[in-house]
């Protein structure tokens, strides 16, 4: 299987950023890691191997990016408003550095956003905010409201809330989205959500599914038995849904 490692200094993030590329052709897949995860986790979790047939046959090409969650949304060292501003710098890095890199590597226009756990948040959020760049989203075991504590998962903004947080919380901004141009772009996409029946974010996924249906945005919600929030579950999910 074709595998490439890349690293460059991002002026937007003021740090070196790394990524891995798997496959040689096919639909481009932007892969976000799990909470505070790394660019190599998708491979280490066995998910690349689960997709080996599709990668070797040229149906898919994966671009596995690094995260800065520990220094942005999951940081406890900086104030909440700085956390989300740092997240916006990461989004700019993805849009202005990673996506052009993927197009240089592969001219295939079809782009999929993929993530597991917190990576699913990144995939859904960036695709909803910038639908012109994506054709499909595969979001596994995701959380789409970061402001509300659920089970032992804390809210990430310490009760602070502002407009920037609102526009980076899919559960909040999507119900109030009425711009027909944006909705038309979203309706060209397909969102695929998968979540465990015992996952604490099941209700959040069901609410997002209801909103997508209300907005007439093509989507499917699949509910798996158990918590279904481990690498072994995601290995099976990507084989089916990607």
Image (cartoon, rainbow, N blue to C red):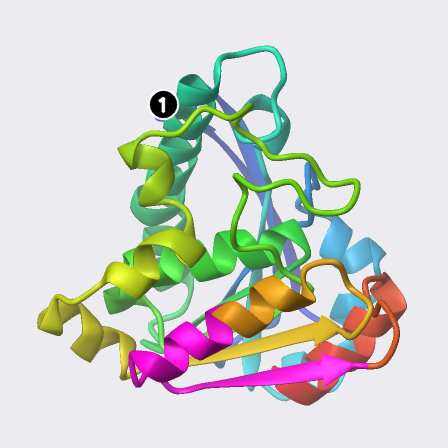
Residue 119 visible in rendering: yes
Magenta residue check for 213: yes
Which residue position holds label 1?
11
Mark 1 burial class by Cα count in 10 Å: few <14, some 14-19, many 20+: few
Residue 49 placement (x, y as % from top left): 81, 72
Above or below, comparing residue 226 to residue 6 in the picture: below
Of 106 and 211, nearer the camera is 211
Query: Quick one: quadrant of the N terminus?
Result: bottom right
Q: Is residue 72 left or right of residue 237?
A: left
Residue 43 placement (x, y as % from top left): 77, 58
Q: Residue at x 17, y 68 (%)?
A: 182
Number of marks drawn: 1
Residue 22 visible in rendering: no
Residue 45 placement (x, y as % from top left): 83, 59
Q: Is residue 10 left or right of residue 129?
A: right
SS state under label 1:
loop
Query: Quick one: quadrant of the C terminus?
Result: bottom right
Residue 189 placement (x, y as % from top left): 34, 80
The image quarter in which residue 84 lies = top left
Q: Is residue 34 left or right of residue 231?
A: left
Q: Residue at x 58, y 62 (%)?
A: 204
Q: Residue at x 32, y 64 (%)?
A: 175
Magenta residue check for 207: no
Above or below, comparing residue 134 to residue 166 in the picture: below
Look at the image and give the residue range highlighted in magenta.
208-224
Q: Is residue 53 left or right of residue 82?
A: right
Of 45 and 199, nearer the camera is 199
């Amino acid at each position: 299987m074709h595998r490439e490692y890349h690293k460059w200094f991002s002026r937007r993030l003021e740090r070196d950023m790394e990524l891995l590329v798997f496959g040689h052709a096919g639909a481009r897949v932007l892969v976000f890691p799990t909470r505070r995860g790394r660019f190599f986790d998708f491979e280490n979790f066995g998910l690349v191997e689960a997709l080996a047939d599709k990668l070797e046959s040229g149906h898919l090409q994966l671009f596995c990016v690094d995260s800065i969650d520990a220094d942005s949304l999951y940081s406890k060292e900086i104030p909440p408003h700085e956390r989300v501003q740092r997240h916006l710098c990461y989004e700019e890095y993805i849009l202005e550095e990673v996506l052009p890199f993927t197009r240089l590597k592969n001219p295939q226009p079809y782009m999929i956003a993929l993530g597991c756990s917190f990576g699913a948040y990144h995939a859904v959020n960036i695709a909803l905010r910038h639908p012109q760049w994506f054709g499909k989203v595969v979001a596994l075991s995701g959380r789409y409201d970061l402001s509300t504590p659920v089970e032992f998962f804390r809210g990430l903004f310490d009760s602070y809330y502002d407009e920037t947080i609102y526009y980076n919380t899919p559960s909040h901004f999507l119900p109030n989205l009425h711009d027909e141009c944006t909705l038309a772009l979203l309706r060209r996409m397909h969102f695929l959500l998968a979540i465990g029946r015992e996952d604490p974010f099941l209700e959040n996924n069901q609410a997002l599914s209801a909103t997508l249906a209300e907005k007439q945005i093509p989507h499917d919600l699949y509910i798996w038995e158990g918590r279904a929030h481990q690498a072994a579950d995601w290995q099976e999910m990507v084989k089916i849904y990607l």
